[in-house]
């Protein structure tokens, strides 16, 4: 099983939450303050920054290897799955997140939470 931090359309109540139907919700969570959300239209993108980072609000889920393969395919080439540090959790195993590979900084969103 893999822990996955989600921050956008996969969250509960959002349009793509059905993709987590077999996953287990663990808790609300917040990233370390090293990221910014970009507004990519109907969905957000998470980008790592060197300075002026923010703590991003999201959810922590546990997903099976099969579901993780499906989510990797869904997120596509625009994102890479990387390890992330969360503020309010200390786990022995890595927590993963989908991070934009090539952020377009003109789409910077001022917020720390995606509201859809």
Image: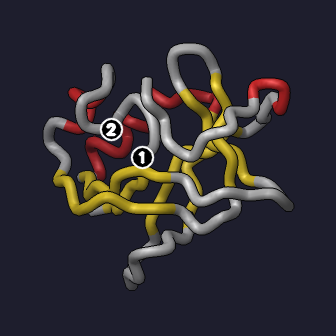
Give the image location of residue 17, x and y in percent: 27, 30
Residue 73 visible in the snapshot: no
Q: Residue furthest front?
A: 110
Give the image location of residue 30, x and y in percent: 47, 62
Which label belongs to residue 27?
none
Q: Is residue 54 left or right of residue 29?
A: right
Q: Is residue 57 left or right of residue 50?
A: left
Is label 2 in contact with label 1 (beta carbons under 8 Å)?
Answer: yes
Name the quarter where the C terminus is drawn: top left
Give the image location of residue 110, x and y in percent: 68, 38
| Classed neighbour count for the residue bearing mark 1: other residues with Cα under 10 Å, few (<14), some (14–19), many (≥20) | many
Q: Is residue 61 left or right of residue 102?
A: left
Image point (54%, 53%), residue name: 56
Image point (39%, 55%), residue name: 4
Residue under pointer 2: 11
Image point (26%, 58%), residue name: 62
Q: Secondary structure at mark 2?
A: loop
Residue 61 visible in the snapshot: yes
Which label belongs to residue 6?
1
Q: Secondary structure at mark 1?
A: strand
> For the residues marked 2 and 1, what is the alpha-carbon distance in whole angstroms?
6 Å
Q: Is residue 113 left or right of residue 29?
A: right
**Nearer-the-camera pick, 108 or 18:** 108
Q: How is the image coloured?
A: secondary structure
Image point (73%, 53%), residue name: 48
Name the quarter where the N terminus is drawn: bottom left
| Classed neighbour count for the residue bearing mark 2: other residues with Cα under 10 Å, few (<14), some (14–19), many (≥20) | many
Above or below 62: residue 17: above
**Nearer-the-camera pick, 57 or 63:** 57
């Amino acid at each position: 099983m893999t822990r996955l931090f989600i921050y956008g359309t996969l969250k509960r109540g959002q349009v793509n939450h059905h993709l987590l139907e077999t996953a287990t919700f663990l808790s609300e969570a917040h990233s370390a303050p090293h990221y910014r959300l970009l507004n990519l239209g109907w969905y957000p993108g998470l980008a790592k920054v060197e300075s002026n980072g923010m703590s991003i609000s999201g959810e922590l889920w546990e997903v099976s290897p099969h579901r993780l393969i499906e989510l990797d395919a869904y997120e596509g080439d625009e994102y890479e799955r990387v390890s992330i540090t969360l503020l309010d959790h200390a786990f022995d195993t890595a927590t993963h997140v989908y991070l934009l590979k090539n952020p377009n900084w003109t789409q910077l969103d001022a917020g720390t939470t995606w509201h859809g």
